[in-house]
Image (cartoon, rainbow, N blue to C red):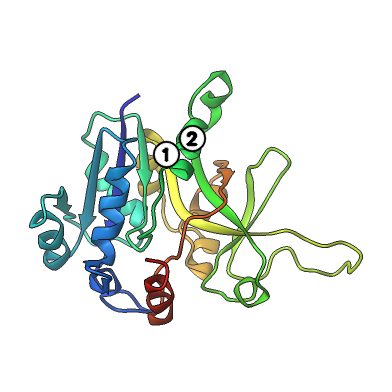
Amino acid sequence: MIKIAMIPARYAASRFPAKLMQLLGDKTVIRHTYDNTVATGLFDKVMVVTDSNIIYNEITSHGGKATMSIQQHESGSDRIAETVAGMDVDIVVNVQGDEPFVQKEPLQKLLAVFEGDAAQNVQVASLMQVLKDPKFISDPNYVKVVVDKNMNALLFSRSVIPYHRNQQIIPVYYEHIGVYAFRKQALVNFTNWPITPLEAVEKIECLRYLENGIPIKMVITQYMGIEIDTPEDLVWAAKLL
C-alpha cells in the first residue's frame, strides 16, 4: 500500500490565531509536527497542505514539502482531499498541524487496522487516549468519544460522554485525538458530502462520517502529547521539550 501523511495547516484559528507559527523551543509548532511525522519513517510522502503563504514558506524554506490549497475549506479533511484526489495513494493519514509531539508507535497502530483480512471493511480510523483529569474531561476543547464493543465510534462530542448517572460504575473517558487514517475513496467521498447537522453544531468534522453511516475504527494510544489549542497549551508543551 502507498501511504502518505498530509498535515492540514490553517494560519487563522479562532481560539489561538497563528498558533502553528508560534515558537516551541527553537522551532515553530508546524515544523515540529512536520519533522516528527517524517521521522517516523512510516510514509512514502509527508506534506503540509495550507492556505497560508507564511506556513508554506516556513516548511519549504527548511527543506520540507508543502502545497497551497486552492479552495476555501471548512475542515482539514476537506483541505487534504483536494490535494490527494489526483494522487496515486491507498491510505492517507491526516496529522493535525497542532500535534507537535507526533510519535511513531501510535501512527503505526493506526495504519495496522488497514492490514489483514479483517481490514477490508475499515474505511476510516482514528486515535483516542484515556482522559483521567476531571478538568480535561469537562473541557469542551477536549473532544470525547464513546465506542462500541468492536472499537467503532458511537459518538464524538465536546460534552462529557458518557454522562455519569450511575455512581456505582466508574466510567472510562476517551479523548479523541485528531489524527485520522482514510482509504483514499473514503476521503474523497467525505468532501463531496454536505456538512451534517451534528458536525455543524459541535464543530467536529468526523461526525460527518457517522452521520453518513460510515464507521470509524478507534485505536487506543497511551500518549500523543499536547494539542496546541490555546496559549496555555503552548506554555505546557514547552515544559515537555
Instruction: Give the distance between the C-alpha atoms of the residues marked 2 and 1, in whole angstroms.
Output: 6 Å
SS for tag 1? strand
Q: Looking at the figure, which quarter contains the N terminus?
A: top left
Give the left or right position of residue 212, taking residue 159 as reference.
left
Give the residue number, with chain letter if any, for mark 1: 182
The amino acid type of the residue labelled 2 equals Gln
Give the left or right position of residue 40, taking residue 232 as reference.
left
Residue 72 rendering spot, x and y as whole percentages: 24, 62
Location of residue 228 with respect to 128 vertically, above or below: below
Which residue in the rendered view is the most extreme toward the top? Answer: 117
Q: Say which residue appears at 50% left-offset and 62% top-offset.
A: 199
Q: Say which residue appears at 58% left-offset and 69% top-offset.
A: 158
In this orientation, which residue lies closer to the viewer: 218 or 129?
A: 129
Q: Looking at the figure, which quarter contains the C terminus?
A: bottom left
SS for tag 2? loop
Asked if the residue at tag 1 contacts the one at tag 2, i.e. Cβ–Cβ closer than 8 Å, the answer is: yes
The 10 Å Cα crowd at callout 1, few under 14, some 14 to 19, many 20 or more, is many
Residue 75 rendering spot, x and y as whole percentages: 36, 59
Location of residue 173 with respect to 160 vertically, above or below: above
Q: Which mark is residue 123?
A: 2
Q: Say which residue appears at 15% left-offset and 51% top-offset.
A: 67
The 10 Å Cα crowd at callout 2, few under 14, some 14 to 19, many 20 or more, is many
Give the left or right position of residue 153, taking residue 26 as reference.
right
Q: Which mark is residue 44?
A: none
Q: Quadrant of residue 156?
A: bottom right
In this orientation, which residue lies closer to the viewer: 100 or 15?
A: 100
Mark before the other along the chain sequence, 2 or 1: 2
